[in-house]
Image: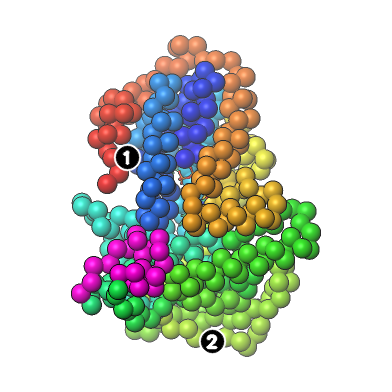
Amino acid sequence: MAGSEAAALVAEKGGIAVVFEQGERPYGKIEDGLPRWHEKLRIKEYERIDENLSHESVYFVPKTEVGGDVSFEELRSLGFNAIILANGAWRDRRLPVEGVEAYVGKGLLYQNALVHWFNHEHEPGYDGPRYEIPEGAIVVGGGLASVDVVKILSLVTHARALEKAGHAPNLIAMEQKGIAAWCEREGIPLPEVELPTLYYRRSMEEMPLASPPDDATERQLEKVRGARVKIMERVMDRYRVKFVGSRVPVAPFVEEERLAGLVFRKTEGEGRAMKEVPGSEEEVRAPLVISSIGSIPLPIVGLPMKGELYDFADWETGEVSGMEGVFGLGNVLTGKGNIKASRQNAAEVTAAVFDAYLDDEPFERLHEAAREAAEPVVAKAMEGTPLERDQRTPIRELVQGRWKAIGYSDYPTWAEAHRAP
Ligand SMILES: Cc1cc2nc3c(=O)[nH]c(=O)nc-3n(C[C@H](O)[C@H](O)[C@H](O)COP(=O)(O)OP(=O)(O)OC[C@H]3O[C@@H](n4cnc5c(N)ncnc54)[C@H](O)[C@@H]3O)c2cc1C
């Protein structure tokens, strides 16, 4: 999404953009991250991205991983006026519990894998990993994506119970209406299901589901806190999920070489004053633990890292340290799916977050935000001396070489042949 906006902007300004995409399709988190119940939104987003990439001055190069099929060093050596990294955040932040990594696939699952499975498992030809979602699973998280994850668990387990009882559940309709309301409308008794639980290290009032403006008054802060509680309570009610706040996972809880839950410790205090309460540990049994504590960019050989992110010299422009002309854009920069453009006042933010759940408006703002952020980068790149024809030869050779290897001719033909199911 961010990359396609930047590419379209370059083309509109009279430049040429080459878009390297590792997959067959360019939809990124819209296809693989956003839960599939956003049906209409996804189609709208696909069309928007298709339109951006169909421009005759945008050269789309699919199935080409930067850092794999083309090294970052090679890209840098080709003389592009600017390189914009819009490769998103696809690595789950590791659950900070010692020893827990040994149980991935044995009681522990990460968010990106779960959502990918949920979005694709019903498609003909799906050959990725298959997961069995037990009732009573737990999610460690607290942000918007983790709320989607706990909803997925509840919808999947309720749909399965309904199926077992001989009904034909419609998961998308259940999401739109709310689980109990859908059952009532259909005249079906609500099945008895052990509900999934979201564990968050802080209180419900502190969930990052709505953000106050930077210079918020006490009243605005109070309003945002209230909005967070309202959002979560609504989610619990509509989607039949549980919430436990003020708990941090501190140790794996293992039985028969499987993760059988986590040991949580209580926390107290708010903001920076939050601290763990010694001696407050409790074992929480769960047949499956999902970690949903954020996604970060995947490292690319040759790109400097600072902690878990790329080393950005300037967070406003997204310029990478020591690499003139290399910029980050979109999730790769923020490391989260944010609704930044709407951070004007608390009331607006509250509306934006509700919308994120009920409506597709915020995505419009994400596009605008991506464009706004790309604007100065593209302007700077366009100030550079345009490459002469012979200077463009290595770029042309790379692009045409990849196209030939892949069997690519033009965007509309490719998009038609590789439609998302
Ligand atoms: C569960 C969930 C719910 C969400 N809900 C909302 C919401 O309600 N409201 C909202 O505003 N936002 C939401 N978001 C966030 C939104 O989906 C993302 O912010 C947005 O789609 C990210 O766009 P992007 O272009 O930055 O990154 P991506 O969509 O991740 O695109 C990056 C692209 O780069 C490609 N790529 C990666 N690495 C390489 C490489 N090395 N070489 C070549 N190509 C590469 C990827 O294949 C991908 O196509 C949600 C996200 C998730 C996961």
Q: In the rendered image, is residue 180 in sight?
A: yes
**In which image quadrant can residue 178 be found?**
bottom left
Question: Mark 2 or 1 closer to N-term?
Answer: 1
Between the residue at mark 2 and the residue at mark 1, the CA separation in whole angstroms equals 46 Å
* Residue 171 lies in the magenta-colored region: yes
Residue 302 seen anywhere in this rendered image of the structure: no
Element type where label 2 sits in the image: strand
Task: Say which residue appears at 38% left-offset and 56% top-offset.
Answer: 37
Q: Residue 107 in the image: state x and y as whole percent.
A: 37, 74
Magenta stretch in the rendered image: 166-186
Reading the image, the residue beneath label 1 is: 24
Which element is circle 1 on?
loop
Q: Is residue 372 left or right of residue 154?
A: right
Q: Quadrant of residue 285?
A: bottom left
On screen, 197 above or below 209?
Answer: below
Residue hosting label 2: 282
Sort mark 2 into few (<14), some (14-19) or many (20+) by Cα contacts within 10 Å. some
